[in-house]
Image (cartoon, coloured by chain):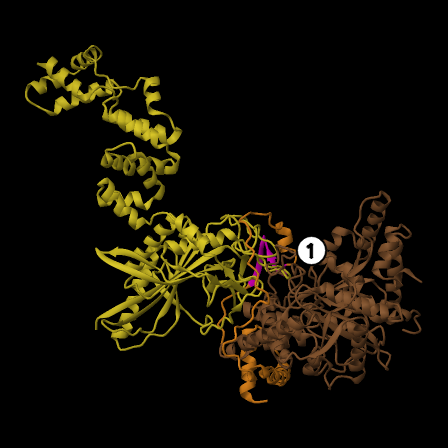
Chain colours: A yellow, B brown, C orange
Amino acid sequence: MEFETVIGLEIHLELQTRSKLFCSCSTAFGREPNTSCCPVCLGLPGSLPVLNRKAVELAIIAALSLQSEIQKESRFDRKNYYYPDLPKAYQISQYDRPLALGGFIEMKNEGVKRKINLERIHIEEDPGKLMHSGESIFDSDYSLVDYNRAGIPLLEIVTKPDLRSGREARLFLEELRCILLYSGSSDCRMEQGSLRCDANISLRPAGSKTLGTRTEVKNMNSFRAVEMALDYEAGRQAAILSAGGSIIQQTCHWDEGDRKAIPLRGKEGSSDYRYFPEPDLLPLILKSDYIETLAASLPELPSQRRIRLMEEYGLDPADAAILTENRSLGDLFEVAAGEYKDYRNLARWVRGDLLYLLKGNDRNPSEVAPSLLIELLTMLDEGEINRPVAKDLLANIVKNGTNPRELVQQKGLGRIADREKLQPVVEKVLAENKDAVDSIKQGRKKAFAFLVGKVMAATAGRADPEKVQKLLRELIN
Amino acid sequence: MELYQKTAAELSRLLQDKEITAVEVFNSFTERIDEVDPHLKVFITCTLDSALETAAAVDRRRMENEELHPLAGVPVAIKDNFCTEGIKTTCASKMLESYIPPYDAAVVEKLKRIGMPILGKTNMDEFAMGSSTENSAFFVTRNPWDLERVPGGSSGGSAAAVAAGMVPLALGSDTGGSIRQPAALCGITGLRPTYGRVSRYGLIAFASSLDQIGPLALNALDCSLLLEVIAGYDQRDSTSLPHEVPQYSAAAGRELEGVRIGLIEENISANFDPEIKFAVLKMAALLEENGARITEVSLPHTDYGLSAYYLIAPSEAASNLGRYDGVRYGYSADGDNIISLFSRTRGQGFGAEVKRRIMIGTYSLSAGYYDAYYLQAMKVRTLIRRDYEKAFQNFDILVGATTPTPAFKLGEKADDPLKMYLSDVCNITDALAGVPSLSIPAGLHSSGLPMGMQLTAAPLNEGLLFQAAAVLEKCSDSPPQQRTALNLTGRGEL
Amino acid sequence: MSDDFIREVEHVARLARLSLSSEEKELMADQLSAILETARKVREIDTVGIEPTAHVFSIPAFLREDVIYPSLPVEKVLQNAPKKMKSYFRVPSITVIEEE
């Protein structure tokens, strides 16, 4: 039987605030254990939460950029459960009145246009972190708790069951990350836990509209893991269903090493979280003009920019994709393109040599002055410098912010085209390479290129290659 | 007259006139504590050393003619559910028997800032759950009027301390009557302010949407002075009200001409002790003589108040008390896995009443019961609020009895939770509506025990309550000291 | 007390993480059923169309600025810890299969 895979995701993103959701402790990653804690995030008796304005703002921006409808009135609730990483034995979350409802992401999967709908978006606090004494949670005699993470603001995004494969789930997450990076609401670093994803997955006979029994897959620590885990789980379910068996509703833990989803038994199967309105926090009431102001400040969506880059600058899809993926690289391109009109050449330099240099030197595109880039490319176009010199100059721009024209003047890096300057060099090269000259005379073209290289080397790459060739031909003959 | 027999206002005047020193005041009260505390058992922790330091510092500053707050040097006691930095804060629970908070509650900061010596932390019902202070995990506090009787609760320690002259002022907390009921049973004055008037930051939570901090004192003026200190907006408590704090103590001199007073039918119920009912009517008549207009009024949903309260408060409590799990602080039982650590810690660390309320609360929030219990109770709360809103369209103050009976005997209701809950029956709807409510002495019962009358006003109208209370105090022929247990001086009488 | 209600009490105690002795369970069942009997009075009222009250006053929520203040020194964070190890709180094994 043919099955259709049905996947819904629950994504948790860390909102990029300086302080925690309900207290003024730092959210900085990698601090010593339990050094970013106060009475509020430790849940000490008598402490009370106070909502972070920035967290609300970033959550609204994220929701708006996902086309989700911001609710004028949303509410905080307590989700009650006991776990040692949860200091108050409840998590402050939003239950039946979330921050935003609906929304979608449009994307392409193997050339097919797909619209993935969202159920809801809400704000909640992160619990602390557990470290286990043994290899894993299962074989540990004891665990250690660090509450630095407790109270870090999270955005939870719940999709509708619109995804159809592990690959599609991965593509969705990549597009989601790109959008949220654009909006500046989260840095989406999965390896630091600032983006986490759980999935619900079920199978149904192709063409059927009813949902099958689902399982929940957790602990997928990379986009690649999401794809593998979901494909694994879809395969497992298909095998059971094909053999006439039935799926048990359960939670599975993706084991990256074994590449297996292991069922977790007895983990509060029928959870009863006893949600109720958080009495310590008033409802969050948002004025329309506030939401409108944020909406107006929203950057262009990556999908829109990708298309615009192709239409406005005539870039090919691959260049447009790279310049979109990295928002500030795209920004650099567009600012430079305001003055430098050979867009395709500009795009090649930006996404090629420049991006390579930025990565190698751990620099951000926003640190590069577009005017220097324009200067460099103009000098190259006008024959003032040679390509190898241009590359060195670009490296200097990235590393030191040096003005290429000044450097050229200072160090005399300009192109050498004068016959008087070139002739002695060429003559010397010819004198030292009599064999090559003979080869050329016998019709071997390779030797000619060899001699050009020698001249270029002797001028530190500055000689005008055309003039060099002309002079060589002249003198050999 | 000894200093410990004076009101806070009198002490404040004498201190400002430099007729006495804060250290003298301190000595008088601490001697009184030494004398009566062994019999009454009020203090869980005494903080006399730091209090003496505060008093001495106040004297020093006054000598240097520094401008001081009028209450600087006037001692105070606080209920043991206010966090005090470096001083153990137990909530009268085994769970927090040796818990030392790393921070001060907002109200504690305020007391310290103006130089009020904090003499100690008073006994209470465990986690403020109870009406007799018998639910303390440590010891029972006795009523200074009759040592065989309860002082009320849950702020029983604070009420008994004021009534017995161990401190002129005390702070309590009131979730469903925990200030007013013990104030009435101990013959003193106690205010539950408007919800949000006083910051709850650092008050160990029982039921967050109901908890409110308030003063206990010998009379209305003293209450108003202490309220002026503790009231006000606090950004650390999101439910704190941003409204400006008026000078409450100025209200004490005003006339009652034209003030509309409603006598709440339900709070002078036929089931109440007839003497209490009579005392309330007599006080109402006094108000009328002073120019107020009195009419009977009904708050029709009062009958449902107790039921709604005993669902809402335990539900919030069950959640608030989840954090006592033996991991970060407090009592911790042995457990070889996490669930046994949690369950044993909580099973052994909490007393019977606390466990009962956690069970009720967990039940009413749990799947399948939420709509029928918790949600329905919250809707009833809306109806109760509307009763008040309607009443305050026609009345400025609502009055009735504070309690149905005077102080009951130790152990009398200890085995019957429902009977105990009923002793707060007059105090609960005010709390559900979030309105301010004051209990004042209403004379002595034929048994020799004090009785209380409760006055309630619209939100933020505490001043009006002090105004009416002051008029009644003036009409009464005896000074406040004689309406209290302060005349019980000798050890023999105790 | 009915066995059903005792089981209910056991279920709620498990949700609330309260270990109760069998005597406590019996007593709790008696008392809870009496208290719930009284509490059920709220169900006598028709509340159709009535909004629940979660907060007595509706004032605008205060939002704090995103500013960092110093956290507690780690010694103070751990000062009340029943069990600690290095700078962590220590808890026993957290893998337990909970029977329901």
Which residue reaches farthest bottom? C2
Residue B28 vs residue A77: left or right?
A: right
Label 1, secondary structure: give it: loop
Q: Which residues are magenta?
A: C81-91
Q: Nearer the viewer, residue A416 or B55?
A: B55
Circle 1 packing at 10 Å, graded few (<14), some (14-19), many (20+), is many
Quarter where residue B484 is shown:
bottom right
User: Disc 1 is attached to a residue of which chain?
Assistant: B
Residue A378 vs residue B236: left or right?
A: left
Q: Nearer the viewer, residue B263 or A132?
A: B263
Quarter where residue B463 is shown:
bottom right
Q: Position of residue C49 (x, y in %)?
A: 49, 76
Query: Is residue A99 inside the magenta stretch?
Result: no
Q: Position of residue A223 (x, y in %)?
A: 34, 55
In the displayed structure, B38 sits above or below A418; it is below
Q: Position of residue B264 (x, y in %)?
A: 70, 78
Residue A314 vs residue A44: left or right?
A: left
Residue B206 vs residue A204: left or right?
A: right
Residue under circle 1? B104
Q: Position of residue B146 (x, y in %)?
A: 85, 77
Across the whole image, how many numbered discs are drawn on residues? 1
Q: Nearer the viewer, residue B350 or B483?
A: B483
Camera sees residue B413: yes
Camera sees residue B136: no
Pick the quarter of the image with the N terminus of chain C: bottom right
Q: Nearer the viewer, residue A222 or A46?
A: A46
Q: Amino acid at mark 1?
A: Asp
In the displayed structure, B162 sits above or below B74; it is below
